[in-house]
Image (spheres, rainbow, N blue to C red):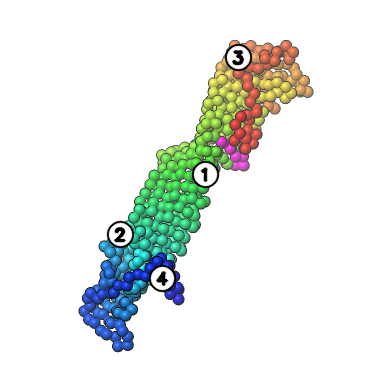
Amino acid sequence: MKRIVFILTLLLVTTLGWAQERERTKIHIEHASQFHKAASSDAVRLLGQVHIRHDSTHFYCDSAYYYEKKNSFDAFQNVHIRVNDSIDMYSRTMRYDGDLRFAEFFDDVRMTDDSTVLETDYMTYDRDEHLACYPHHGVTTRGDKQLISELGYYRDDLKEFRFFKTVKVLSPKYQMFTDTLYYNTRIEKMWFQGPTTIVNEDNRMEGTHGYYLTERDLAYLDQNPVFYNETQWLVADSMLYDRQRGFAKAMDDIQMIDTAYKVILRGDYAEVWEKRGFSFATDKAYAIYYDGGDSLYIASDTMFYHFKTDLNKEEKLIGRRHVRFYKSDMQGQCDTMTYNMADSTIRMRVKPILWTSDSQLTSDLINIKIAHRAIDSLIQQGNAFIISKDSIEGYNQIYGKEMVSRFRDGNIDHVNVNGDAKVISWLREDDSSLIGINKSTARNMKILMKDKEISLIKYFQNIDETLFPEKDLKESERYLDGFIWREEERPKDKEGIFVRK
């Protein structure tokens, strides 16, 4: 019953495409070893090396029943149709209607078109529409790949297949699973619709719409595409993947996730180079390093991520141009920032500024060492400056050519100041009453901190220290050269990394 409905539907669709009645041509018997007239019908039975021609199409079989009045015939055993120079069809049994120019093939059906082979148990072929159809389970082989589906069509004039229902593409290089697939063998391009998965030995892609260029191993997906392997995920609005180059490109609302190294990269444009272990995101780009409960949020014009491969031995997260970052215990901005995950170090370059607790740190270069998810130590090189607000008024300031700071519980514990060391500190009694403002210089200093304030200074070489009453220092004398308090630029939360001051 299903086959009858299928045939009637095909005939209705193809017949509606004709505006006028076809010209009726007769079937011709070219050869048969024996002819027998059937007693109970107008059929003629043909036996032995049967050769039938209808227009330019030739039919071959072992035996046939020919119905002259109906202009049709039934063919049996070793059925073969030569449609044109490239297309041949085979089966055990066939029915052919010469007026409709329509054939039905039964059992061990095979169609070949150059290097393409279609195999199924039942198939129809409409000569006028150049359309071959199978309603249940067919296997198409082309080169090293097989295409399997429950329903399929082939337009031989366009060299295009259409596969429906549980479609599979199997090859040594990849496998594809989808609901609907169009495949043009002339240009070696596949289009897919509906939930689709493309799998190879290294990764998987999923999406609901796109295409695949088979000779180039290049896939394009849109409508919720996902690209992933054991540890990495790439999600975007649209995505292109070149398997030969190991290259993926994603556009709009992108999210790259590396679960091994706890990195999330976001933006509106991204590229991933698998073999080089390199990726980047730009256009509203930012990254999240989520190792532990306190995540590090970084925004910049472009975010780069280097992941470990045979060519790349280190994992690094790099922000370039207008870098701003936020973590609960530190915030900062600079032009270039590198987070090396192998040794848990952060390098800030070009006008870096770091805020931690109540302190503001600036210099030409800043290197930060992270341990146990918090700052362990940092180095400031070139015009190093540490500023913190006094508990009541004024600013405590430390300057040197280089500083090395050690941290405890998220606060500076002590600072080694090397070269041209200078300090201005507001000294207070336990009741917070002001003792005076201390100004001191030395070649080198070691400064001990307690409760976020300077508790002791050790001086080395060329020492000059003076304690001034507050009234004896002009406002301008209470600041070291180069002092700028930049608290208004400090990111107050993770959303603050997107606000440029």
Sort mark 1 into few (<14), some (14-19) or many (20+) by Cα contacts within 10 Å.
some
Q: How far across and how far down the image is residue 310, in percent?
A: 41, 41
Query: In which quadrant of the rendered view does residue 378 lie?
Result: top right
Query: In which quadrant of the rendered view does residue 11 lie?
Result: bottom left
Q: How far across and how far down the image is residue 51, in percent?
A: 24, 74
Q: Amino acid at mark 4?
A: Leu
Q: Which residue is mark 4?
A: 11
Mark 1 → mark 2, Cα distance in angstroms: 40 Å
Q: Which residue is mark 1?
A: 252
Q: Earlier in the sequence, mark 2 or mark 3?
A: 2
Mark 1 → mark 3, Cα distance in angstroms: 55 Å
The relative height of residue 297 versus residue 145 in the rendered view (above or below) is above
Mark 2 → mark 3, Cα distance in angstroms: 86 Å
In-image side of 382 versus 189 (left or right): right
- From the viewer's side, name the closer residue of 37 and 143: 37
The relative height of residue 487 versus residue 191 in the rendered view (above or below) is above
Q: Amino acid at mark 2?
A: Ser
* Residue at 49% across, 57% down: 195
Q: How far across and how far down the image is residue 292, in percent?
A: 60, 42
Q: How far across and how far down the image is residue 224, in percent?
A: 52, 51
* Residue at 47% across, 40% down: 279
Q: Earlier in the sequence, mark 4 or mark 3?
A: 4
- From the viewer's side, name the closer residue of 3 and 351: 3
Mark 4 → mark 3, Cα distance in angstroms: 100 Å
Is residue 294 highlighted in magenta?
yes
Q: Which residue is mark 2?
A: 115
Query: In which quadrant of the rendered view does residue 368 lie?
Result: top right
Q: Which residues are magenta?
A: 291-299
Question: Badges 4 and 3: C-beta atoms under 8 Å apart?
Answer: no
